[in-house]
Amino acid sequence: MAYITLDGVSKQYGSVWAVDRVDMAIDKHEFVSLLGPSGSGKTTLLRIIAGLETPTQGRVLIDGEDVTHLPPHRRGVAMVFQEFLLFPHRTVYENLAFPLRMLKLQKGEIAERVDWVLGILALRGLEKRYPNQLSGGQQQRVALGRGLVGRPKVLLLDEPLANLDRELRQEMEVEIRRHQTALGIPFIYVTHNQEEALSMSDRIAVVRGGRVEDFASRTDIYDRPKTAFIAQFVGRSNRFEGVAAQASDRLAIRGEGVLIETAARPGIGEGDNVVAYVKNEKVRLKLAEPGAAAGANTIAARIRHVILRGAYAEYVLSWSGGELIASRPRDGAELPGGAEVTAYWDAADVDLFAQAGGDQ
Ligand SMILES: Nc1ncnc2c1ncn2[C@@H]1O[C@H](COP(=O)(O)OP(=O)(O)OP(=O)(O)O)[C@@H](O)[C@H]1O
Ligand SMILES: [Mg+2]
């Protein structure tokens, strides 16, 4: 039995369906991300789980109980926001004690729980400081502590790291995931940042236009995108358009200046307009051999420039069809800017989709 169930949940604002028939089942020990572009309905979905919005249709169940019409404080959920929302004129201790005072707990119990949170979040010694005397990461920890101090059954987080710089964000990602594992409660984490979703989640729900386009393990979302939108949105890919031709168990896709070959897919046949994606890290490069014939899954290209990204390098290539990007680990064998190269990839690394109306 799932710990959290969303059953046909929708939310209408005027003529907009911000959330549209969402079904999800989340287990007790899961870290789940809702990943999608701006305006896709992530915050609305989270607020429905929190009880800050009532769904127009559908039900929300937490721990076996239908909470659809329960107010937030009776659901056992807590929410952490992007804007830390700390009280500026109260100390760290007072900020952490506040939710417990709302719950009308005894003084001793409050002290005990605040101390527990100060301990797990490494905030001991900072109790008497005010928010403006803390670093961004410390402020974020206090905000997280305010969510955890009431010992919620579920923690909901809405882009909590969006205001932090990259390095601090990456540290906090590790920390947040560690707390989730230690506490053994589900965290539902909203973000439009695929790196955050990929670094922390057990499963990722990709949200688009109020709908959950796929809800699957992070590796499935990354390695086996179910839709063209997911292929485009998660990871960095090269995109090709073409027309499919069937050859027994294989498909040949003729695009402008490129021939792509890959395994046949159900639902894609002779003459269909298709879109193919090849992730940047799947594109390999070798120096061009004069006179070599271009086969399937190869492109003759020229290195325009190389972007160093630390552990790997991104090669920006030009070819007759436009631009192509290949990323490679920096293993010493760097190719020079300006070089003529052959870019190539495996048939298995092609993500292929029928071009439906509405896909860009
Ligand atoms: N209170 C509201 N009244 C009317 N429309 C709303 C309201 N809240 C959200 N919407 C609309 O619902 C849709 C989804 O909004 P939501 O805030 O859930 O998106 P989001 O995925 O969280 O986006 P972002 O990444 O920008 O935070 C948007 O079209 C938004 O304009
Ligand atoms: Mg939002």
Image (tube, helix red, strand yellow):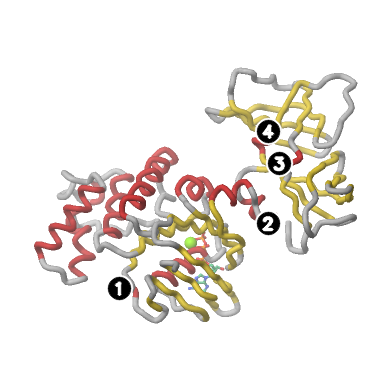
In primary-sequence order, the first of circles 3 and 2 is: 2
- Residue at x-position 60% and y-position 18%: 332
Say which label, 1 or 3, has the lower sequence index: 1
Queried on whether the Cβ of the residue with tag 1 lies below 8 angstroms from ligand 1, the answer reads: no
Q: CA distance from mark 2 to mark 4?
A: 22 Å
Q: Nearer the viewer, mark 2 or mark 4?
A: 2
Q: Which mark is residue 171?
A: none
Q: Earlier in the sequence, mark 2 or mark 4?
A: 2
Question: In this figure, which residue is indicated by the disc labeled 2?
Answer: 227
Give how far apart the Cα atoms at labels 2 and 1 are: 38 Å
Mark 2 packing: few (<14 Cα in 10 Å), some, or many (20+)?
some
Residue type indicated by callout 3: Asp
Q: Reading the chain from its start, which is encountered first: label 4 or label 1?
A: 1
* Distance between mark 1 and mark 3 Cα atoms: 48 Å
Type of residue at label 2? Thr
x, y percent for residue 144: 31, 54
For the C terminus, the image quarter is bottom right
Considering depth in this image, is 179 or 247 the residue closer to the camera?
247
Residue at 44% across, 57% down: 189
Q: Is residue 85 above or below residue 166?
A: below
- The numbered disc on residue 326 is 4
Circle 4 residues within 10 Å: few <14, some 14–19, many ≥20: many
Instruction: Give the answer, above or below, for where 11 lies relative to 273.
Output: below
Q: Earlier in the sequence, mark 2 or mark 1?
A: 1
**Neighbour tally class for label 3: few under 14, some 14-19, many 20 plus, Cα within 10 Å:** some
Q: Which residue is mark 3?
A: 349
**Marks 2 and 1: which is nearer the front?**
2
Q: Residues within 10 Å of mark 1 (few under 14, many from 20)?
A: some
Residue 106 location in percent, x, y?
Answer: 11, 67
Residue at 51% from the left image edge and 45% from the top image edge: 195
Q: Which mark is residue 73?
A: 1
